[in-house]
Amino acid sequence: MPSPVNTRADLDALAPSELADLMTVLAGSIWRLMRDDANERWIAIEDLSSVTRFGFTREDFPLAAPPALPEWVPAPDPRETMTCSDLQALLALDQLGLADEYEAWCTDPQRTFAEKAFINRARTWRRLDATFNAAADALEKTEEEKDQLFALAVTL
């Protein structure tokens, strides 16, 4: 197994077959992929930092072509994975001074079956859960305030 290659001297000391293998790796390092969310696409960016470190230039890799770009898939909404326990949520509501308002919402006789089930049985609160959002909307909370509630809850 070859020694680590950290300098040009290490590179010059490689056997020809090892050098060929490393040159293939270096050629593959010329391009990096980056998400372009604004235009809903991937872009390949030429980055010569790996090859210039060893004293090479782009001309030393004439066949290094940009890679095929993957299919664009929108980034998931980070709120999809926001969860906390019911205890964490209730403690966060209390810290934010919303416990009484939430209790009033919970005890309103107009609650639907689904809302009552959420109140009495949910052990995990999910940020995008319809019942959580109905309760937060009743408390006139903005989307940012809902996110802040979850951010606080997971710390408790």
Image: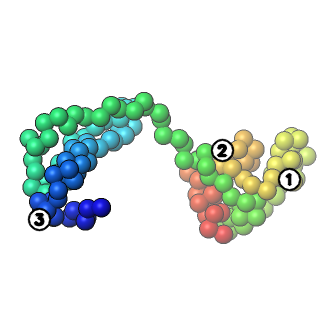
Residue 101: which quarter of the image? bottom right
Q: Which residue is drawn at 14% across and 41% down?
A: 61
What's the amino acid at mark 1?
Arg
Mark 1 lies on residue: 121
How far across and down, in percent of the image, does residue 132 sit?
72, 48
Mark 3 lies on residue: 9
Mark 2 residue crowding within 10 angstroms, few (<14) / some (14–19) / many (20+): some
How far across and down, in percent of the image, does residue 125 sit?
72, 53
Sequence-first tag of 3 and 2: 3
Q: Residue at x 54, y 47 (%)?
A: 78
Left or right position of 139 against 1: right
Sequence-first tag of 1 and 2: 1
| Nearer mark to the viewer, of 3 and 2 | 3
Mark 2 lies on residue: 128
What's the amino acid at mark 2?
Leu
Quadrant housing the C terminus: bottom right
How far across and down, in percent of the image, does residue 135 sit?
74, 48
Placement of 10 over or under 147, stated as above or below: below
Placement of 44 over or under 94, stated as above or below: above
What's the amino acid at mark 3?
Ala
Observer-nearest residue: 1 or 37? 1
